[in-house]
């Protein structure tokens, strides 16, 4: 539970590679996510090359920190794997959160950049990687060793957001 409470969005990374065994753990964590009908639609592109990270950092006005990450994962949904066509974003969101929590557990920092929230950004990612039509870009998860930022507890609980038995 500590990872849940301490996780923060880390956007500044040291110039340090993320070890292959940690990349493997992050991918394994993502693939352990719950999935509607057990469809597991996820596919991942792992980008570590500095030039690849630089190009990927340009797909959105918000994705600039990608360039300095140790690794960025491109989370994709395979439309050919969907048993429940309306649930792919929920499946992918669970995979993304698992990845971010495992990053904290491994002493890394991470940040989630939305892709499926913008048709333009989805098209940019699809074009950059020459994705086939049945592959849907969902998000970028940039990970690395934090540089100046920390994964530390910030209390976000708000009692007024909790409603008992009915809407108040």
Image (cartoon, grey):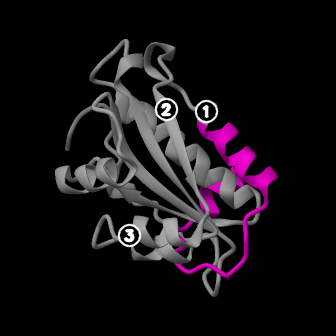
Q: Secondary structure at mark 2?
A: strand
What is the x, y in percent for residue 111? 50, 64
In the rendered image, the vertical position of residue 28 relative to residue 153, given as above or below: above
Say which element carries label 3.
Answer: loop
Q: Which residue is mark 1?
A: 31
Quadrant of res 151: bottom right
Q: Quick check: marks 2 and 1 in contact, CB under 8 Å?
A: yes
Which residue sits at x=72%, y=76%? Answer: 16
Tell whether label 3 touches label 2 (CB within 8 Å): no
Residue 41 percent coordinates (x, y): 46, 26
Residue 165 horizontal/vertical position (percent): 30, 31
Q: Are there few (<14), some (14-19), or many (20+) residues within 10 Å of tag 2?
A: many
Task: Write down the region rendered in magenta.
Answer: 1-30
Secondary-structure class at tag 1: helix
Quadrant hosting residue 81: top left
Quadrant placement of the C terminus: top left
The answer to whether 73 appears left or right of 125 in the picture is: right
Q: Which residue is mark 3?
A: 63
């Amino acid at each position: 539970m500590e990872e849940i409470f301490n996780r923060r969005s880390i956007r500044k990374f040291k110039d340090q590679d993320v070890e292959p065994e940690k990349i493997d753990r992050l991918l394994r964590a993502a693939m352990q996510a719950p999935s509607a009908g057990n469809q597991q639609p996820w596919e991942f592109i792992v980008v570590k090359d500095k030039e690849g990270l630089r190009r990927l950092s340009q797909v959105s006005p918000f994705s600039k920190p990608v360039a300095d990450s140790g690794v960025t994962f491109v989370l994709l949904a395979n439309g050919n794997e969907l048993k429940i066509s309306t649930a792919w974003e929920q499946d992918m969101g669970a995979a993304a959160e698992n990845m971010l929590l495992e990053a904290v557990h491994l002493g890394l920092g991470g940040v989630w950049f939305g892709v499926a929230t913008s048709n333009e950004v989805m098209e940019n990612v699809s074009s950059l990687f020459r994705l086939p039509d049945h592959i849907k870009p969902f998000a970028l998860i940039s990970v690395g060793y934090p540089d100046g930022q920390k994964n530390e507890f910030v209390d976000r609980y708000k009692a007024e957001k909790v409603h008992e038995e009915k809407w108040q």
